[in-house]
Amino acid sequence: MSAAPARIIFSFSSVEPLLLAASPAAAGNSRQGRRRGEFIRPLAASNKLLRNDFDLQEGLMDVQKILHQRQKSDREIMVTIDNLKRLCIDHYFEEEIQSAMSACMNLVHSDDLFDATLAFRLLREAGHDVSATDDVLWRFTGSDGEFKLSLSKDIRGLLNLHDMSHLNMGGEAILYKAKEFSSKHLASTIRYLEPSLAEYVRQSLDHPYHLSLMPYKARHHLTYMQSLPTRDTAVEELAVAEFQLNKLLHQQEIQEIKRWWMGLGLAQEIPVVRDQVLKWYMWSMTALQGCSFSRYRVEITKIISLVYVVDDIFDLVGTLEELSLFTEAVKMWNTAAADSLPSYMRSCYKALYTITNDIADMAEKEHGMNPVNHLRKAWAVLFDGFMIEAKWLATDQVPTAEDYLRNGVVTSGVPLTFVHIFIMLGCDQSTEALIDHMPSVISCPAKILRLWDDMGSAEDESQEGFDGSYRDFYLMENPRCSPTDAEAHMRSLIAMEWEELNRECLCTRIFSSNFTQVCLNTARMISVMYSYNKKQRLLVLEDYARMLIL
C-alpha cells in the first residue's frame, strides 16, 4: 500500500464526535448463534445517529419478516438475498441467508438463465462447491459449445451471467466465454434500454460486481431499485440507514486520525513525505467494513501511514548507511536502538514502535496473547525489502522483472498491514507461518497492487526517487515488446492473481471469512486507487469519497 501515487486533495469538514460504541471483538463472534429478532449491532447507540422517524430495530424486524414471507418462492427469496448483499446489509441476516441456500440449490440447475446464474453466484460466494460447466452453463450452450444467441435478449440473465463470470477460479473455460458473450451483448443493447436500466448495465460493465467496491456498488444498486415500479421499501430504508450510520462513523474516524497525524509532526519534520490522511484511511475503510471494526480501521490507518513514510524515507531522504542503521534498529526493537539515527528517523521509529506496541497490547486484551514479536518481525521483513531496493538503486543493479516483482510484493506494504489485521481479528492460524510462508490470500492482493502501480497510469508529482518498475524491467528483458504489450502482459498477470485469490477465498477457505473479506476488499480497492483518466483524476475514488466520507 506504500507505492500508491497521490492525486486528490480533499478538504475536511468539522464533525462533532459521535456516540457510537463499536466493539471489534463482536465482529469476530458474529457467526455464533443469535435468537430471532436479535441483532449483533449496538442498536441503541446506532439509533442516535439516524433520523428521528427511523428505528433501526424495527427496520431490521421488517426486513426479517419479508425474508420469512418470501421463503415460499425460491426465486423471490434468492432475489431478496441478492439485494441484501448488493446493498451491504446482509450481515444482519446471516442465519436467514444461510437457511435460504436451499433455494439456490434448487435453482442452480434451472433452465432459466437468470435463476441458474444468480443461484451459482450466491452458492459460490457462500463457499459451496459448484461447477460452472457441470451444474449451470452447459444447458445454455449449443452443440458448438458457444452460448445460444437467443440468450442475448435476456438482459437480467446476461447481467447475472456477467457477474458470475468474474468468479473464475482458473481453468474454467466456460466462464471466459460467459464474460465475452455477456459483455458483448450487454454493451450492444444499452442504447435500446430505458435510462435507469441502461445506466445500471453500463455500471455493471464498467465496474463488475465481484471486482468492485461493495459500498460504491451499493449506492448505485439502491438508485436502480428506487427506479423500479415495484419497490422494496423496507429493504431500501434499511440500506439508507446503513449508509447514514457508516458515513457518520467514517467522518468521526477520519477526524481522529487527522488529529493523530497532526500531533505526530512527521509531515513537518520530513517535508518530502506524503501527507495523505484521507487516502490512507480509505484503504482501511475499504478493507475493514462495518461499525464493529471502527477501532481497527483507525489503528490500521496509522500503520498504513507509517508504511508510506518509511517508503518515502528510503526513496527520497536516507543514505544507504542511514537506511541500514534504520533497518537494524527496527530488528532490535527497543527505543535505545534508535539513538544513533538521524532525528527524523528517530521520530519515525518512535511512532511505528509506539503504534505497533499499542496494537499488540490491544490484541492481548481482546484475544489473550501478545503478538508483538510477530509484528516486529513483519516490520523487519518490510525493511529488508526496502533495503534490497535501496541497494539495487545505489549500485545501479538491474534486477530481473521476476525478482523485482517478488520483492515488490513485500514492499507494497500489504503483507505487513495484513499481518496486523490478522492479529487484530484474533485468527487462530499461526501468525509466524503467515510471515515466513506468505499465503496466496496475502500475496495476490500485494502482487495486484504492485502491478497496477507499476503500469504507470500517472506520474506522481510528489515522488522524485526512482526505484524502477515491473514494466521497465519487463521491457528491458523483452526489447521487441512495446509499452502496450507490456501493459497487456501485466493485466494478464493481474487476472491470474484474481483467479488464485478467488480459489483461496471462495473454495479453499483456510482462513476466517472476516480475513478473506479483508483480502478481497483490498484487491477491489486497488484499481480505484490507480485508474487515472486522461486529466490525471481518479474519478471513481472521488465519487467513493463523496459517498462515504465527505
Image (cartoon, helix red, strand yellow):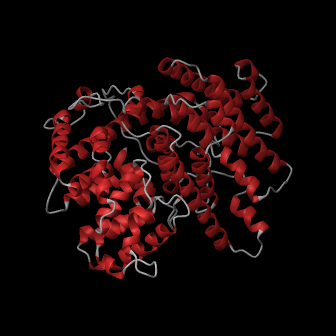
Quadrant where the C terminus is found in the figure = top left
> Height in image: 296 above or below 308?
above
> Height in image: 139 above or below 522?
below
Q: Residue at x 54, y 33 (%)?
A: 422
In the rendered structure, the answer to whether residue 395 lies left or right of residue 255 reads right
Quarter of the image holding residue 419? top right
Residue 207 in view here:
no
The one nearer the camera, 433 or 524, is 433
The one nearer the camera, 92 or 539, is 92
Q: Position of residue 210 (x, y in %)?
A: 43, 56
Q: Position of residue 238 (x, y in %)?
A: 22, 43
Q: Position of residue 434 (x, y in %)?
A: 63, 36
> Height in image: 82 above or below 175?
above
The one nearer the camera, 122 or 225, is 122
In the rendered structure, the answer to whether residue 160 lies left or right of residue 462 reads left
Q: Residue at x 82, y 57 (%)?
A: 398
Quarter of the image holding residue 130? bottom left
Please tell me how many numbered marks the rendered image carries: 0
> Height in image: 547 above or below 157?
above
In the rendered structure, the answer to whether residue 188 lies left or right of residue 74 reads right
In the rendered structure, the answer to whether residue 81 lies left or right of residue 421 reads left
The one nearer the camera, 542 or 80, is 80
Quadrant where the N terminus is found in the figure = top right
Residue 314 in view here:
yes
